[in-house]
Amino acid sequence: MYNPKSLKAEEFIDHQEILDTLKYADENKDNFELIDSLLEKAKNLKGLTHREASVLLACEDEERTKKMFDLAEQIKKDFYGNRIVMFAPLYLSNYCVNGCVYCPYHYKNKHICRKKLTQEEIKREVIALQDMGHKRLALETGEDPVNNPIEYVLESIKTIYSIKHKNGAIRRVNVNIAATTVENYRKLKEAGIGTYILFQETYHKESYEKLHPTGPKHNYAYHTEAMDRAMEGGIDDVGLGVLFGLELYRYEFAGLLMHAEHLEAVHGVGPHTISVPRIRKADDIDPSVFDNGISDETFGKICALIRICVPYTGMIISTRESPEVRDRVIRLGVSQISGASKTSVGGYADGGEEENSEQFDVSDNRTLDEVVNWLMSKGYIPSFCTACYRAGRTGDRFMKLCKSGQIQNCCQPNALLTLKEYLIDYASPETKKIGEQLIKNELDNIPNEKVKSKCIELLDLIDKGDRDFKF
């Protein structure tokens, strides 16, 4: 029986409720009166339910689809302005005991080079990332209690935060590791992590169990209930995501929104981020084996509807997607992107590709400077800001600021300050020139005059060599 307030996975992600939702969506996909009313409702910036959203996803009317895209773009501007937060993944280890059939880390893969970074190697990776200009990382490991115990992850976080190289510093470490215990989540919180990220992969239980035939990840309920344990452990910023292509996308879309509704119903805080990865080619993995792939057009519509239905959430798109696709969907609601990513263990300091340790093929191979330049040429502000996390604006405190629009008085100046740091310390001459003009133009978009005046003062101090100011 469907119950969004239940702590049991099969009750807050109820299979029959999803089937009923998809049936309802099919019955109403041409009900233009209903669809128009849902689009009007969404303009109130309170979101839509999974059932309402599924109707919009099923609608194939071109005129109304365009309205969805335009509305998503407006909602993105209302909540996040034109800022795009930058990050990079850091792979610590690809040892894994699971048998996931879509991931090259699966334990039966004898082709892949298994590697685990030492703390000294982690330092070299972090310095390489700092030398690019990155301030925010997402840690990635395979699931292996012997090679990648929680103690290893905690030690690695401590190492990352300790490294100060030239003007570089990693100011926020997000963590994407396997589902674990409340006690371990509490330890991660105490270590100072930002967001805990865990992809569901698929919300279809039967498919989930087939796709994860062996290993601890086979346990659907334990995996699906991980975010509740994380929040019980004190982590109030959590990130959801499915791997599109494993199961029918309409099923996944409904399940994803149901999970967001569950977190809001139980904890009063929805997901801090939602990621939208699509399955990609990798060692020992052929994505054509999975026959649920989605077109770029459908992918864009999913991105737009996530923004409409969960307006407050950050939306992440990685270098799994090509520059062309990222260019298309970034206006539809994406608020965070990776840049110059390596998905191999040790890939930043030594290249790593020849060792064949990548998790998936990267489709956007541009340097961070090229990505920053591209964003600014499109009128976006690349932001390296980590201020909310370090100022304690997480969980319900962040959500209240975000939903009220007050976050603009923090995020806009912080984005400009961190961009200024990047331009001085890391940018090419051309990128610096574009960025300086962008900052000058964007200062006028800070609504509060006192905040604007203070921002100008701090930008001048950054020019003189000071770093790490935040509102």
Image (spheres, rainbow, N blue to C red):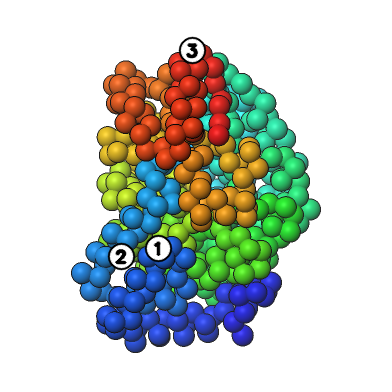
From the viewer's side, name the closer residue of 275 and 376.
Answer: 376
Give the residue displayed 69% in from the left and 57% down from the top.
231
Q: Distance between the residues labelled 2 and 1?
A: 8 Å
Residue 426, quarter of the rendered image: top left
Quadrant of the image containing the N terminus: bottom right
Relative horizontal placement of residue 4, taking residue 291 as reference (left or right): right
Q: Which of marks 1 and 3 is nearer the N terminus?
A: 1
- List the residue tagged with mark 1: 308
CB-based contact (under 8 Å), mark 2 and mark 1? yes
**x and y percent of residue 292 in the render?**
38, 68
Give the residue displayed 28% in from the left and 51% down from the top.
328
* Number of residues whose C-alpha sits closer than 10 Å to that of mark 3, classed few (under 14), some (14–19) or many (20 or more): few
- List the residue tagged with mark 3: 464
Question: Which-is-in-front pick, marks 1 and 3?
Answer: 3
Find numbered disc 3 in the image and state the secondary structure of the residue it sits on. Answer: loop
Q: Which residue lies furthest to the left in this view?
A: 63
- List the residue tagged with mark 2: 68
From the viewer's side, name the closer residue of 234 and 180.
Answer: 234
Q: How far apart are marks 2 and 3 (CA)?
A: 45 Å
Find numbered disc 1 in the image and state the secondary structure of the residue it sits on. Answer: helix
Question: Which-is-in-front pick, marks 2 and 3?
Answer: 3
Residue 103 in view in this figure: no
In the picture shown, does residue 63 fall above or below 342? Answer: below
**x and y percent of residue 140 in the render?**
58, 44
Which amino acid lies under the numbered mark 3 shown in the image of this protein?
Lys
* Number of residues whose C-alpha sits closer than 10 Å to that of mark 1, classed few (under 14), some (14–19) or many (20 or more): many
In the picture shown, does residue 414 fall above or below 194? Answer: above
Give the residue displayed 34% in from the left and 39% down from the top.
380
